[in-house]
């Protein structure tokens, strides 16, 4: 198991988990969000290949319309 920070909270995930695997486990289907890994915004096309490593800091930020 790997220890990471996900949206500021300590979590444990399986070794070999990709960003897309994490999003699937969290049931995130909304297209209006970005993923930041260690202070860098990841392009969506990298989610499937980008593996998460020990002590990575992952932030998932959603956008909501309103006025």
Image (cartoon, grey):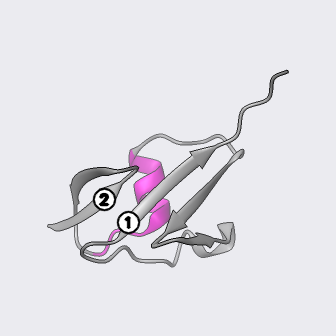
For the residues bearing labels 1 and 2, Cβ distance under 8 angstroms: yes
Q: Which residues are magenta?
A: 16-25
- Residue 58, picture quadrant: bottom left
Mark 1 or mark 2: which comes first in sequence? 2
Crowding at label 1, few (<14), some or many (≥20) Cα neighbours within 10 Å?
Answer: many
Q: Quadrant of the C terminus?
A: top right
Q: Position of residue 47 (x, y in %)?
A: 56, 69
Residue at the spot x=46%, y=65% of the render?
19
> Left or right: where does residue 63 sit relative to residue 47?
right
Image position of 35 with respect to 27: above or below: below
- The residue pinned by badge 1 equals 57
Question: What is the CA distance from the residue labelled 1 to the residue labelled 2?
Answer: 5 Å
- Residue 18, picture quadrant: bottom left
Q: Position of residue 29 (x, y in %)?
A: 60, 42
What is the tally of numbered marks visible in this picture? 2
Residue 5 is marked as 2
- Residue 38, picture quadrant: bottom left
Residue 19 is marked as none
């Amino acid at each position: 198991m790997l220890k990471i920070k996900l949206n500021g909270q300590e979590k444990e995930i399986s070794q070999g988990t990709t960003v897309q695997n994490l999003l699937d486990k969290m049931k995130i289907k909304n297209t209006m969000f970005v993923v930041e890994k260690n202070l860098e915004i990841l392009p969506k096309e990298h989610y499937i290949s980008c593996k998460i490593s020990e002590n990575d800091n992952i932030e998932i930020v959603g956008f909501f319309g309103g006025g």
